[in-house]
Image: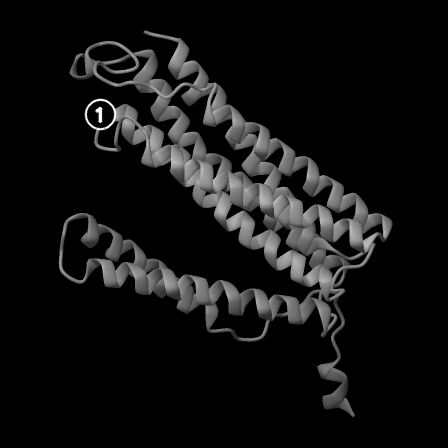
């Protein structure tokens, strides 16, 4: 009886069982980093190592999310205290992402407000034809802001208990996200400059490219939420998985607004 009493959990927190996924994810990140560097320097096997790392990361994303969904939906491990911890973790993750993009904006303003003689002492640099913000960038801005509105609609539908409306609005959000990614890819293909064209090309493709990568991750996140919503994993009171995806998507929206106003609009209209 004493041994059974010792095994009774006397706190609201979930002690996670031993998992291999953090170690496997670290191996995938290491492989993709080394593979990317080797590939960019034309070493043999660099592309294969990069692909192996990316496949490993995608596999870990699937299995780790599967385990978390199982803990939340079937084992009942996500108590109020656990959900509060998850919310704080998601907030801190988004803050870290803000700092990540802050570095790109810092590089952009450092180069644009004080252009060096190597690029002609002007901004945009001499010989660079900047992309007009009133074409595809404006259209993509409208699409992404619309997706933010539709994901908010889905959130209110879940809280109200309207499953069909929540599914419809979530599917609309995903369609907007796919269109945005396709248009950004089209813009890259037809861009009048490349990443190697001075600091302008580097900052443009790194900032907008990483944002596009975050859009793809957010699209996967919302797609998983769509399946979970279809299989009744969310209720009116318990739907943090969707809330986390919605927070992430709103973060993506805000970052794009700053990208549009600075790199596209300000960078195109202001010549230093």
Left or right relative to 195: residue 95 = right
Q: Is residue 100 visible?
A: no
Left or right relative to 55: residue 34 = left
Q: Residues within 10 Å of mark 1 (few under 14, many from 20)?
A: some
Q: Nearer the viewer, residue 2 or 241?
A: 241
Residue 211 in the image: above or below residue 259: below
Kindly identify the residue that appears in the image at 63 percent across and 38 percent down: 147
Locate residue 177, reporting x and y percent. Answer: 55, 43
Colour basis: one colour
From the image, which quarter does the N terminus lie in? bottom right
From the image, which quarter does the C terminus lie in? top left
Left or right relative to 175: residue 193 = left
Residue 54 in the image: above or below residue 66: above
Task: Determine the image quadrant of residue 185.
Answer: top left
Residue 196 in the image: above or below residue 217: above
Left or right relative to 63: residue 191 = left
Kindly identify the residue that appears in the image at 66 percent across and 50 percent down: 171
Task: Determine the image quadrant of residue 190.
Answer: top left
Q: Nearer the viewer, residue 222 or 34?
A: 222
Locate residue 180, reporting x and y percent. Answer: 51, 38
Locate residue 73, reporting x and y percent. Answer: 72, 69
Kindly identify the residue that appears in the image at 62 percent across and 49 percent down: 245
Kindly identify the residue that appears in the image at 79 percent across and 44 percent down: 156
Residue 123 in the image: above or below residue 176: above
Count of residue discs? 1
- Residue at the disc numbered 1: 198
SS at mark 1?
A: helix
Q: Is residue 225 visible?
A: yes
């Amino acid at each position: 009886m004493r041994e059974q009493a010792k095994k009774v959990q006397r706190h609201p927190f979930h002690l996670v069982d031993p998992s291999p996924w953090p170690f496997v994810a670290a191996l995938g990140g290491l492989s993709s980093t080394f593979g990317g560097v080797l590939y960019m320097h034309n070493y043999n096997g660099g592309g294969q190592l990069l692909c192996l790392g990316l496949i490993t990361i995608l596999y870990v994303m699937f299995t780790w999310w599967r385990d978390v969904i199982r803990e939340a939906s079937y084992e009942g491990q996500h108590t109020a205290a656990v959900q509060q911890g998850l919310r704080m973790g998601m907030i801190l993750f988004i803050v870290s992402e803000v700092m990540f993009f802050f570095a790109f904006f810092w590089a952009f303003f450092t180069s644009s407000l004080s252009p060096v003689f190597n690029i002609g002492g002007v901004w945009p640099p001499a010989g660079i034809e900047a992309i007009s913000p009133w074409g595809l960038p404006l259209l993509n801005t409208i699409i992404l802001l619309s997706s933010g509105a539709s994901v908010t609609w889905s959130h209110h539908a879940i809280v109200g208990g309207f499953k069909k409306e929540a599914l419809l609005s979530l599917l609309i959000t995903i369609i907007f996200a796919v269109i945005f990614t396709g248009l950004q890819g089209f813009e890259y293909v037809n861009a009048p400059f490349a990443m190697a064209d001075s600091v302008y090309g580097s900052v443009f493709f790194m900032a907008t490219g990483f944002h596009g990568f975050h859009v793809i991750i957010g699209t996967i996140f919302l797609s998983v939420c769509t399946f979970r919503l279809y299989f009744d994993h969310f209720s009116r009171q318990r739907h943090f998985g969707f809330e986390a995806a919605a927070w992430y998507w709103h973060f993506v929206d805000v970052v794009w607004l700053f990208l549009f106003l600075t790199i596209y609009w300000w960078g195109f209209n202001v010549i230093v």
